Amino acid sequence: MAIKIYIDQGHNPENPNAGAVGNGLREQDITYRVGQELAELLRANGNYEVRLSRPTPTSALGTSNTTSLRARVEDANAWGADYFISIHTNASENPSAGGTEAFAYARPSAAFTLGEDIVEGIVSVTGLRDRGMKVRPGLYVLRKTAMPAVLVELGFITNASEAALMNENPALFARGIYNGIETYFR
């Protein structure tokens, strides 16, 4: 029986619910590309079934921030996903802020453990700083999903070198997430 993984590519192509911008890049473009790369890796494995929140670059969900988040959660819940992974880029006023981190609803939990493995996977392939795994029960996609859910902040779009790495090598970040998922299921 294949493990059903819902990949939520954070944010919409345009408002409502467009993402952060930095260094001439848009969060929603990076998350779209990383999600597509991750889906390919998971599908090629054969042990996973995958659904993307944004199957095409123009896919948009909802008519507001709230309905966009709800649409993602409802799609994953209705599909019966076993795990939910929401992909994002971080942003900061401080251009030197950097690193990878992730969030889960609670600790201890399956999601927290999966998130730790994903952060470790990304850090090991990218060399970015490990900002760790954190609990964020207020995040809608972590609170409303019926399955373990992790929100991953790949790196900082406001950090020039991290933004360039995410933009030029989305497959590297997908590989890191994939390696973390594989570690979790081993």
Image (cartoon, rainbow, N blue to C red):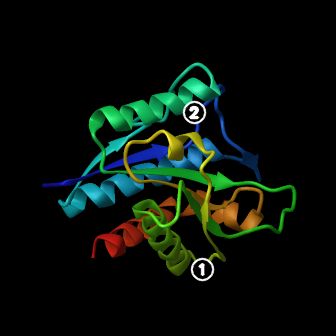
Q: Earlier in the sequence, mark 2 or mark 1?
A: 2
The answer, for residue 59, to whether it is visible in the render is no
**Which residue is rendered at x = 61% and y = 66% of the image?**
101
Q: Position of residue 35 (x, y in %)?
A: 44, 50
Query: Relative to the observer, which residue lies in front, 79 or 162?
Result: 79
In the rendered structure, which amino acid carries the disc numbered 1? Answer: Gly
Q: Residue at x 19, y 61 (%)?
A: 47
Q: Which mark is residue 12?
A: 2
Q: Point out residue 156 in the picture as x, y percentages from the top left corner.
A: 70, 60
The residue pinned by badge 1 equals 127
Left or right: 88 with respect to 57?
A: right
The answer to whether 147 appears left or right of 115 in the picture is left
Of all residues, the one furthest to the right in this rendering is 94
Residue 182's place in the image compared with 76, above or below, is below
Determine the residue positioned at 39% across, 57% down: 38
From the image, which quarter does the N terminus lie in? bottom left
The span from disc 2 to disc 1 (Cα, nearest Å) is 28 Å
Hey, what amino acid is under mark 2?
Answer: Asn
Quadrant of res 103:
bottom right
So how many labels did they put on this image?
A: 2
Return the x and y of residue 73 as percentages of the image width and height: 44, 36
